[in-house]
Amino acid sequence: MVMIDDTLRSLEARIQSPTLDPDTRASLQELVEQLKTEIDKLEDAEQAESVVAHTAAGAREALRVDKDDDLLSHTLEGMQKSVRRFEASFPDLTKVVNSICQQLSNLGI
């Protein structure tokens, strides 16, 4: 679970980006806390690492100053595919990650 913890810390640090307004930042921080709760419920750390890695990659690309639309699209697609694999077994996890995707989309990403 070390990778998961490291990735979550990195994701949380990226959310502190000065490009985000305080309300958006607070909303994303709340979603990350929900994500942590759902990951803790997973019995297979490898599955959790996959979800966290895809989510972090999506956030990293979304928060870049010089965005590459193709790379961002590819990264978000990977995140969405990862989540769909868990949808049947982990509906709450799916809901949280989809909320993160929606939040990023609302930012125009």
Image (cartoon, rainbow, N blue to C red):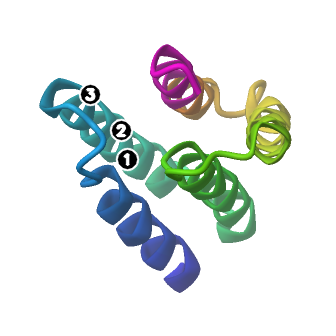
Q: Amino acid at mark 3?
A: Thr
Judge left or right: residue 106 versus residue 19.
right
Give the magenta part as a residue range.
99-109
Q: Position of residue 97 (x, y in %)?
A: 56, 33
Instruction: Tell me which numbered mark, 2 or 3, is placed earlier along the sequence.
Output: 3
The N terminus is located in which quarter? bottom right
Q: Is residue 59 magenta?
A: no
Q: Is 91 or 104 nearer to us in this picture? A: 104
Give above or below for 51 relative to 81: below
Q: Amino acid at mark 2?
A: Gln
Is the residue under label 1 in contact with that under label 2 (CB below 8 Å)? yes
Residue 98 to residue 79: above or below: above
* Identity of the residue drawn at 45% across and 22% down: 107
Q: Name the residue located 51 percent from the left edge and 84 percent from the top edge.
A: 2
Residue 96: x and y in percent read 49, 29
Q: Which residue is mark 1?
A: 37
> For mark 3, what is the residue?
24
Q: CA distance from mark 2 to mark 1?
A: 5 Å
Name the residue located 44 percent from the left edge and 44 percent from the top edge: 35
Question: What residue is disc 2 on?
Answer: 34
